[in-house]
Structure formats: C-alpha cells, structure tokens
Image (cartoon, helix red, strand yellow):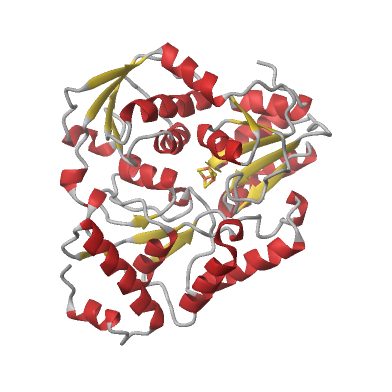
C-alpha cells in the first residue's frame, strides 16, 4: 500500500507509540485487503468498550495506546458493559464497575467523546452523504452506509481506534463504489404494521440475501426508528452492512435494481417471528432500545407505562444514549418510567452487559436483541412496544 511521507513517519515511530501501532494495524489491513492507499475519515465509532468483552488483556492494550495516543477526528464509543452512572441500580458488581471505569478512563485520555451508544448518528456523530468514516458497530455501520449514504467498512475495535489516531483508514471494501453495487433485488409484498415487523423483515431479507447487497422495493414509508431496527436485524441475520431501499435511502436512485429477484411475503415475516420467538410465557426481563432508543421511542414508552407498575418478578430496561436520557429527564419521561418501576440503562445494552445467568426470558422489540440474548442463555420473545410493556407489567407474554 502506498504511504505518504507523513504516514511513513508515523509507521517509523516518529509520532509516538500509538501512532506507530495504529499505522502497523492499518498497513497490515491494507495489505490483506489490497488497498492502494489510506483515505481520510470524517469520524470514528469504536466498538469493544465493554469490559465483559475486553477482559484484562483488552484493558492493557487500551492503556498502552492511551500513554501517548490522541484521536485526530470526532470519535465516539459503542455501548459499555454498564450504565456509567447508574450501574448499581442495574445489578452490576463493584469489581466489574471498577474495571469498566478503567476502560472508560483510557478512552477519555485518548480524547474520545464518552458517549457510549450504537446510535451515534442521533447524538451528533452524523456523517454527511458520501463521507468516508470508520465505524464499528454493525447496526450503526449499516445505518451509515444505507440510510445516510456515508461509506464505511465494519471495523473491529482495534482498526477503528487506529483510524481515530491516524484520521485515516485503508481504502478497500465499502469505501469503493464498485463494491457498493446491489446484487439482489428484494420485492417486499408484506405489510409492516409495528416496529418489530422491521426486525422480522431484516431477519427474512438477511437470510435470503446471504451476504449480498439488497436493493429493496415495495416499501412506501419508513421512519428513522424503523430503519434503525431494520439495519440491526438485516446485518445480524445475514446480509452485507449496506442496502438500498427504493424511494427511501438516498443512493437508491443512483443504482439499478438487479435482475436476480426474491420476494418477501407475509409468510416470510411470520416465519421470522416463529424462528425468533421461543415457547415461553413467563417473562423476567424486558429490554427495549436495541439499537438504542430515540427520544421519540422513550416518549412512547412513557405513554405506555404511565400509571402502571412493572411486575415484581420482571425488570424493565430502557436502553439508550445518555444524551437521549437527558432529553427524557427534561421532558418528564424519565420520571414517568421510573415511577412505574422501569429502569434506564444508559451507555449499555443487553448484548454487552454481563447478563449471563441473570434472566431466563426476554421480551423485546428487537430481532438483534433476541439473537444476542439467546447467546446469554435466555428464551426470547419479540413484539411491539405495547406488547413488551404489557409483558413488563404482567410478567407474561400474552400474544
Ligand atoms: Fe446496539 Fe447493543 Fe443492540 S449495541 S444494536 S443495543 S445489541
């Protein structure tokens, strides 16, 4: 890969340890994937923030980089293993919190904005159409590529950090227009009535697309919350972190629908629910906010729980960014949700918090949340926000 003089100096260690390590990572990646050069990125989103996933080896790696590493572009974080303020309330141990705080401390010293969320585009890390970025979290990467029309590969934690220290990433994969051409046409004939139907649609398309780039037709309207739910699901269950939706995503008019066509019928949506939902009726954990709740979703939750009480045997978590929570505080939604017994889980999520063994059965709006919670040995139920709040109040899944 061609390196400029400045990049070569960084690789030679003239700008310190973190810059050298970063250039080593980027040069190796560039060589593996045949990149000709590095390109500037407008922002970075770093995954690998939860101590649950990092462990002591990961923490040590971060501390080494934090000795002299300073990010060169706007950089935000993926969810951590706990709510950074309210972790006790969520049942996190002192030991875990101490380690997680050391991780956050290392990121702080690097100059990273401590906003731990998989919806960075809702809190100020918003690329423009066509901008190159280096993001990590799969739903955010899919949203950036498809809904915003920015360009990013799905970075690992170390390669995203390296991009942040250098301000550049190797130009390969989804940074190149020739790799952004759709190779499957998906005609959607099914009705999408509620938020979780978008997760089911993502499941159905992900399974059929099998790592292809889908050009989706047949959808007339889509809200941002629906698209973020779809992004999380479609990439979890199969396809590339890029799709086109005719009339909805900005680049859909710039490419042709491929000839190779599959359809999505009502039966595919039903099949998705059948596969995602387990046989279980007692629910001890309800978690909404995967991807992290927008302020609009928090408002809907507040409306649904108003005047009700969460069941004594069930926990209700509203997973969101701290920024959205601050808006919820101002609007009075926090007070309504907490008065019902619901808890905010800011900065974290059900996939990266240390939850294994704590809960038996999850209810959620999210197909992706179900996928990861099964890995935490939970039974899963996916449904609308209304169904989830009903499950939180009754402790039962009724539909
Ligand atoms: Fe976000 Fe965690 Fe879901 S990172 S997309 S809330 S699994």
- Front residue of 376 and 350: 376
132 sits left or right of 201 in the view? left
The answer to whether residue 122 of the structure is visible from this angle is yes
86 sits left or right of 10 in the view? right
Question: Percent x, y for residue 292?
Answer: 54, 44
Say if 8 sits above or below 316 in the image: below
The residue under the point 41% across, 72% down is 71
Question: Percent x, y for residue 312?
Answer: 84, 34
In the picture, which quadrant includes the C terminus?
Answer: top right
The answer to whether residue 194 of the structure is visible from this angle is no
126 sits left or right of 311 in the view? left
Q: Quadrant of residue 358?
A: top right
- How many numbered callouts? 0
Question: Percent x, y for residue 375?
Answer: 58, 40
- Front residue of 291 and 352: 352
Say if 284 sits above or below 53 in the image: above
Seen as rendered, the residue at the extreme right is 312
The residue under the point 19% across, 60% down is 35
The residue under the point 49% across, 23% down is 197
Question: Percent x, y for residue 138?
Answer: 42, 46
Q: Quadrant of residue 13?
A: bottom left
The residue under the point 18% across, 27% down is 258
In the picture, which quadrant includes the N terminus?
Answer: bottom left
165 sits left or right of 383 in the view? left
């Amino acid at each position: 890969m061609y390196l400029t003089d400045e990049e070569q100096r960084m690789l030679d260690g003239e700008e310190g340890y973190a810059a050298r390590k970063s250039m080593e990572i980027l040069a190796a990646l560039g060589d593996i994937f045949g990149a000709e050069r590095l390109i500037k990125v407008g922002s970075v989103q770093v995954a690998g923030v939860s101590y649950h996933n990092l462990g002591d080896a990961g923490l040590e790696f971060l501390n080494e980089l934090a000795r002299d590493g300073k990010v060169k572009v706007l950089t935000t974080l993926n969810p951590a293993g706990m709510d950074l303020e309210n972790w006790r309330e969520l049942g996190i141990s002192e030991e875990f919190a101490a380690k997680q705080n050391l991780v956050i401390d290392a990121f702080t010293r690097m100059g990273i904005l401590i906003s731990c969320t998989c919806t960075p585009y809702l809190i100020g890390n918003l690329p423009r159409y066509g901008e190159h970025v280096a993001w990590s979290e799969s739903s955010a990467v899919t949203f950036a590529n498809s809904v915003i029309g920015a360009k990013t590969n799905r970075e690992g934690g170390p390669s995203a950090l390296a991009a942040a220290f250098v301000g550049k990433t190797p130009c390969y994969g989804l940074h190149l227009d020739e790799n952004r051409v759709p190779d499957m046409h998906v005609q959607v004939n099914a009705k999408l009535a509620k938020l979780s139907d978008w997760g089911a649609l993502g499941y159905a398309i992900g399974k059929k697309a099998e790592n292809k780039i889908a050009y989706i037709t047949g959808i007339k309207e889509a809200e941002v919350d629906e698209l973020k739910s779809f992004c999380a699901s479609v990439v979890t269950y199969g396809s590339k972190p890029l799709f086109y939706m005719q009339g909805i995503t900005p680049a859909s008019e710039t490419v042709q629908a491929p000839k190779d066509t599959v359809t999505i019928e009502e039966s595919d949506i039903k099949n998705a629910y059948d596969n995602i939902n387990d046989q279980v009726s007692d629910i001890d954990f309800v978690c909404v906010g995967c991807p992290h709740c927008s302020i609009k979703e928090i408002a809907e939750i507040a409306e649904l729980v108003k005047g009700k009480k969460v069941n004594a045997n069930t926990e209700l978590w509203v997973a969101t960014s701290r920024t959205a929570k601050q808006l919820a505080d101002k609007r009075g939604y926090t007070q309504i949700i907490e008065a019902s017994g619901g808890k905010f889980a800011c900065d974290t999520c059900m996939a990266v918090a240390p939850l294994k063994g704590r809960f038996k059965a999850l209810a959620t709006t999210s197909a992706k949340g179900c996928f990861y919670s099964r890995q935490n040995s939970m039974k899963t139920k996916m449904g609308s926000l209304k169904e989830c709040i009903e499950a939180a109040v009754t402790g039962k899944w009724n539909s």
